[in-house]
Image (cartoon, rainbow, N blue to C red):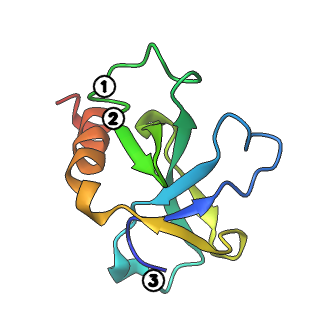
Amino acid sequence: MAQFDVYANPSHSAAQGIPYVVVVQSDLLDALATRMTIPLASVTFADKAPEKLCPSITIKGEQLRALAHYAAPLPTRSLRQVVANVAPQASILIAAMDVVIAGV
């Protein structure tokens, strides 16, 4: 399970508006049973959110918004199959987490 791997949202009840989650936790913490994730929502679900806090991410040609303020740990066992890896877009995810933590 690599940092910036994208998985289908394990919450079936929320998956329509938030189809994916992205792992933002460092690979150095692989021994933990959870992974810190950011939900990836459809653009219409998060259309009024500030871009710096909720940046646009493209997965399989679909534009989504990363909801950094909803970052949460999920059990590793609930993250099944990797859908994509967004490491090339890592800097905007890290900047969004900086907004959450430091307001920058």
Secondary element type, mark 3? loop
* Mark closer to the chain start, 1 or 3: 3
Query: Residue 7, located in which quarter of the rendered image?
Result: bottom right
Q: Residues within 10 Å of mark 3 (few under 14, many from 20)?
A: some
Q: Distance between the residues labelled 1 and 3?
A: 30 Å
Mark sitting on residue 11 = none
Circle 3 sits on which residue? 30
Q: Is the residue 64 above or below the residue 60 in the image?
A: above
Q: Which amino acid does label 2 sit on?
A: Pro
Secondary element type, mark 1? loop
Q: Is the residue 104 above or below the residue 77 in the image?
A: above
Expressed as whole percent of the image width and height from the top left, the position of residue 19 reads 64, 46
2 and 1 marks in contact (CB < 8 Å):
yes
In this view, the mark in front (1 or 3): 1
Q: What residue type is labelled 1?
A: Glu
- What residue occupies the far bottom of the structure in this picture? 31
* Mark closer to the chain start, 3 or 2: 3
Expressed as whole percent of the image width and height from the top left, the position of residue 11 reads 76, 51
Left or right for 68, reference 73: left
Circle 2 sits on which residue? 55
In this view, the mark in front (3 or 2): 2
Secondary element type, mark 2? loop
3 and 2 marks in contact (CB < 8 Å):
no
Please tell me which residue lies in front, 100 or 21: 21
- What residue occupies the far top of the structure in this picture? 48
> How many numbered circles does the render carry?
3
Mark sitting on residue 51 = 1
Please tell me which residue lies in front, 28 or 38: 38
Query: Residue 30, located in which quarter of the rendered image?
Result: bottom left
The residue that appears at 33% across and 35% down in the rendered structure is 55
The residue that appears at 73% across and 58% down in the rendered structure is 10
Q: Residues within 10 Å of mark 2 (few under 14, many from 20)?
A: some
